[in-house]
Image: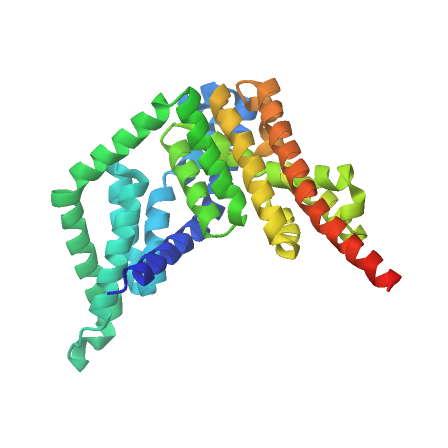
């Protein structure tokens, strides 16, 4: 067995699960955030007001995060036969306090078992029942029993330990965790590494640990803000199209979309990607060190009214963006000077 290939396949399946999960997180997270914004924190314990009902709808959605990622990991592996078993066992993981770790394990187990059962030959008389009855039934039964009798206790312990560790982080430890999440979010801006960091932040948010989720959401703002600053600080390094792209990227970053930075990274990856990774990592690291948190799923600048320390939150964004801008411009200036020198030498000849 090629371990490297198998690991890459599992990562792809996990990325697929996260991709399907993101719209759920956005819808449920925004509903919850709006309820808290307009109804106050008291809406967590009531449904006799409009904002309380809105919060209830959002929280209902957030409860499906684990079963949904489990189901679509299985779907990525085995297609439809893996979907129902993973939804059921993923909900088991949610109810048993096994969290994201349990959901991922259930998704992989259901997917690979259902995929194996698809290859089992059955009599022609029951072949029509194979996909809609036999595979879902056997897969749900086997994985459900294994989760209950074998894996529940150790995974519950791991989840509880991870939650306690995240809640107890402060100072340097919180800064390091936030810096790593920031670097991962900035590295491929929507790619597999970004989605792993995003999923970890969402898992932390759903478990009540808001430091990692705050850093993850903050990381969305820094790359577009940094590239926008870069085009302002040294216009000669960027053409008209890039300067226009920077304005668009900045607007997208304000509302929580980091992909506006991708055109810069595609055009000049060796200079842009290291710069946004370093800048975002430092900015998020500062937010972790300062202990900044916010209990909504609003990202970047939209979260400003709800963070625990607005001035330091803005400092984190500003420092991360400025470092990104200065670094990318310094790297581009080297290339610009070399090209200029080559052009001058050619004209002299």
Name the image quarter holding the N terminus.
Answer: bottom left
Evaluate whether residue 225 shows in this view.
Answer: no
Please identify the quarter of the rendering in which residue 160 is found: top left
Residue in front for this viewpoint, 8 or 233: 233
Residue in front for this viewpoint, 283 or 219: 283
Q: How is the image coloured?
A: rainbow
Query: On the picture, is 91 further left or further right than 126?
Result: right
- At 80% across and 43% down in the image, what residue appears? 235
Percent x, y of residue 268: 64, 53
Give the answer, above or below, for where 333 lies relative to 206.
Answer: below
Give the answer, above or below, for where 38 lies relative to 67.
Answer: above
- At 20% across and 59% down in the image, what residue appears? 139
Give the answer, above or below, for where 281 lies relative to 342.
Answer: above
Query: On the picture, is 333 further left or further right than 316?
Result: right
In the picture as drawn, the residue positioned furthest to the bottom comes out as: 124
Q: How many marks?
A: 0
In the picture as drawn, the residue positioned furthest to the left comes out as: 149
Name the image quarter holding the C terminus.
Answer: bottom right
In the picture as drawn, the residue positioned furthest to the front comes out as: 349
- At 73% across and 49% down in the image, what residue appears? 245
Percent x, y of residue 136: 23, 61
- At 62% across and 51% down in the image, what residue appears? 265
Percent x, y of residue 173: 39, 25
In the picture as drawn, the residue positioned furthest to the right comes out as: 348
Evaluate whether residue 83 shows in this view.
Answer: yes
Give the answer, above or below, for where 103 lies relative to 1.
Answer: above
């Amino acid at each position: 067995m090629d371990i490297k290939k198998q690991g890459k396949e599992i990562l792809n399946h996990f990325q697929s699960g996260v991709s399907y999960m993101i719209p759920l997180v956005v819808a449920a997270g925004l509903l919850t955030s709006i309820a808290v914004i307009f109804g106050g924190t008291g809406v967590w314990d009531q449904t006799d007001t409009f904002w309380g009902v809105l919060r209830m709808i959002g929280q209902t959605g957030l409860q499906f995060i684990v079963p949904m990622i489990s189901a679509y990991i299985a779907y990525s592996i085995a297609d439809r036969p893996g979907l129902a078993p993973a939804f059921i066992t993923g909900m088991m993981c949610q109810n048993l306090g096994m969290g994201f770790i349990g959901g991922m394990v259930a998704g992989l187990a259901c997917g690979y078992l259902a995929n194996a059962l698809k290859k089992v030959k059955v009599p022609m008389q029951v072949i029509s029942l194979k996909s809609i009855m036999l595979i879902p039934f056997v897969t749900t039964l086997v994985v459900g029993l294994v989760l209950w009798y074998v894996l529940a206790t150790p995974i519950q312990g791991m989840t509880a330990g991870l939650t306690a560790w995240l809640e107890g982080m402060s100072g340097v430890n919180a800064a390091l965790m936030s810096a790593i999440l920031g670097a991962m979010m900035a590295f491929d801006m929507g790619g597999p590494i970004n989605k792993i960091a995003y999923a970890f932040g969402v898992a932390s948010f759903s478990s009540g640990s808001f430091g990692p989720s705050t850093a993850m959401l903050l990381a969305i703002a820094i790359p577009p803000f940094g590239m926008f600053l870069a085009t302002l600080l040294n216009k000669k390094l960027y053409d008209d199209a890039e300067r226009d792209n920077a304005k668009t990227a900045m607007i997208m970053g304000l509302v929580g979309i980091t992909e506006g930075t991708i055109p810069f990274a595609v055009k000049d990856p060796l200079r842009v990607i290291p710069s946004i990774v370093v800048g975002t990592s430092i900015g998020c690291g500062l937010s972790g060190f300062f202990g900044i948190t916010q209990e909504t799923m609003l990202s970047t600048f939209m979260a400003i009214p709800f963070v625990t320390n607005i001035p330091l939150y803005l400092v984190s964004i500003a420092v991360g963006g400025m470092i990104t801008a200065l670094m990318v411009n310094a790297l581009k200036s080297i290339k610009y000077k070399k090209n200029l020198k080559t052009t001058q030498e050619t004209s002299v000849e």
